[in-house]
Image: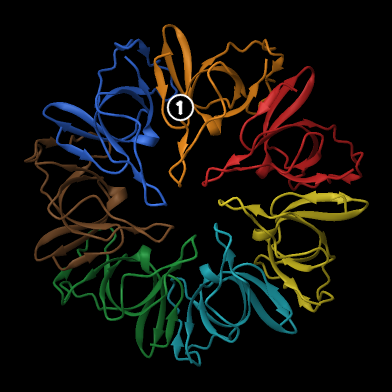
Chain colours: A cyan, B green, C brown, D blue, E orange, F yellow, G red
Amino acid sequence: MNIKPLGDRVVIKVLALEETTKSGIVLPDTAKEKPQEGEVVAVGPGRVLENGERAALEVKVGDRVIYSKYSGSEVKMDGEEYLILNGDRDILAVVEK
Amino acid sequence: MNIKPLGDRVVIKVLALEETTKSGIVLPDTAKEKPQEGEVVAVGPGRVLENGERAALEVKVGDRVIYSKYSGSEVKMDGEEYLILNGDRDILAVVEK
Amino acid sequence: MNIKPLGDRVVIKVLALEETTKSGIVLPDTAKEKPQEGEVVAVGPGRVLENGERAALEVKVGDRVIYSKYSGSEVKMDGEEYLILNGDRDILAVVEK
Amino acid sequence: MNIKPLGDRVVIKVLALEETTKSGIVLPDTAKEKPQEGEVVAVGPGRVLENGERAALEVKVGDRVIYSKYSGSEVKMDGEEYLILNGDRDILAVVEK
Amino acid sequence: MNIKPLGDRVVIKVLALEETTKSGIVLPDTAKEKPQEGEVVAVGPGRVLENGERAALEVKVGDRVIYSKYSGSEVKMDGEEYLILNGDRDILAVVEK
Amino acid sequence: MNIKPLGDRVVIKVLALEETTKSGIVLPDTAKEKPQEGEVVAVGPGRVLENGERAALEVKVGDRVIYSKYSGSEVKMDGEEYLILNGDRDILAVVEK
Amino acid sequence: MNIKPLGDRVVIKVLALEETTKSGIVLPDTAKEKPQEGEVVAVGPGRVLENGERAALEVKVGDRVIYSKYSGSEVKMDGEEYLILNGDRDILAVVEK
């Protein structure tokens, strides 16, 4: 992956949303905001805190994650659809295999 | 539970809302925002403070909690309905058994 | 009381609002926001500051307090009406007996 | 005065607004926000800073103060009208006798 | 001047706005926000920072200053019109004689 | 380049947007906000943190970057179009060659 | 120049906007916000940080700068038009001669 996200951003590969995803997570179709599933392909160094340190992100490349729908910026590369998300704000959880 | 919440997020199992919940808590039906009851199934490491430390969350797996209605993101897994909440902001109290 | 409030939250028992409350405080009926009176029944550990410490709340169980109307979340238990408030923001003063 | 304000709050006794107040201050009647005059009857311990200290308030009981109109919560006690104000935000100045 | 401003507030005497003020400053009448000129008559101790220190204000009694129009609270005393301003936010510059 | 950006600002040269950019990145034409590609030509010293340090920016002159559309201020020089962006907020990632 | 700006403010002399300014910078006339050019004539001491230090401004008297249009307060003196700007927020870059 030749996109290197900056700060607390993360690049994820959007996973096709079957009704029941491979990991058994079903993202219900209620009107409310439906979180999405994707795979982490690149992780930024984390945001800079007011004491000058960086707050490393918890996710790593290869993690399967649940993230808030309608977040991030779309980027397409070699036919794949990617999203550049804000790691702290948009990614809710990691789905352990 | 194979969902690992990030930062100050918490995954709870939504408890069916009888008028009088098992713990004797009745969440009145007034127009005002009615808090809900649920059980904690996974807890994140807490948010990062500006001094770089993490502020651990007060709740633990198994706690029965009261949380603000209309908060969090819905996720369904193995037929159960879960919510991914913000621990500090959305969870109001623990109901001691 | 088996509700344990989190962070800087406080559980109070709403006191029936006679025109002149037992402590001599009259909460006038002007259109403006009328503060309310209640009794503290449970106190959270306080909010976490950016230096990692907790800012303990000033109120304690048994205190009679004045709080901003329309604040907090309602919870009913064993026939009594309780409110879960934000201690710092919603509670204005303690009424000394 | 048996009302003990919390945090950076202050209880003041509202002074009847003659056109020229005893201290010579005239609070003009222009459409713009007209500050008001009152006397401090109780002072809170001050707000908690992010380093855990409290920022003591500058006013003391007995001070005659000028405060922003339309601020605070009304409370009546023993026939007197009081306001619970935010000391830092609502009180503009002390009028020296 | 018997008004003692609190925190980062400053009391100024509003200078009559001739087209060209004594100091040669002309405050153009364009529709845009026109800054005003006044003289400092009392200065507060400055705002409290999160480390507990006070940030002293840069202006002193007697300074002729330029401030943003429509800011502050009006107070009249002994026939003179005064404004209680926020020193950091409302006062733009000192006009050196 | 004789424009020296201040604080956490960055000057970039806007790259003409072919459907598939040289680096293989396709910025899809969906209604959603489409990030853009550009080349860094000047980098500011970074923003000042509350502890007085500067948070250096991650990008350097020559980097090919993806940035949020509709951000920054346009400047034209010697026939080339440049944008002055906020490095932390507007630049999402570096595209490695 | 007898205007001494306070805090992080800067006084600039507005440069007449020819289509191509002397430094070769053309500020395009697109509908989008067009930055402006001016010369620094006075610089404030910088804003006070939460640790009590001042964050000195990067610009100095004589610098030719690019700033966001529609920012600052207008002041006219001795026939010249000046703007009092917020140094950190409104000034984007220095144009090196």
Residue topped by disc 1:
E44
Residue G64 drawn at (x, y percent):
82, 39
Relative side of C1 to F19, left or right: left
Q: Residue at x 43, y 84 (%)?
A: B3
Q: Residues within 10 Å of mark 1 (few under 14, many from 20)?
A: many
* Quadrant (top left, top right, bottom left, bottom right) of the C terminus of chain C: top left
Q: Does residue F56 lie above or below E87 as drawn?
A: below
| Chain identity of mark 1 | E
Residue E37 horizontal side relative to residue G24, left or right: left
In the displayed structure image, the side of residue G28 where residue B56 appears, left or right: left
Q: Nearer the viewer, residue B14 or F63?
A: F63
Q: Position of residue E67 (x, y in %)?
A: 59, 25
Residue type (three-letter) at the residue carrying disc 1: Gly
Residue at 76%, 74% (x, y): give it. Answer: F95
Q: Can I make out residue A28 in this image?
A: no
Of all residues, the one furthest to the left in this rendering is C22
Q: Circle 1 — which element?
A: loop
Where on the picture, by quarter, is residue B84?
Answer: bottom left
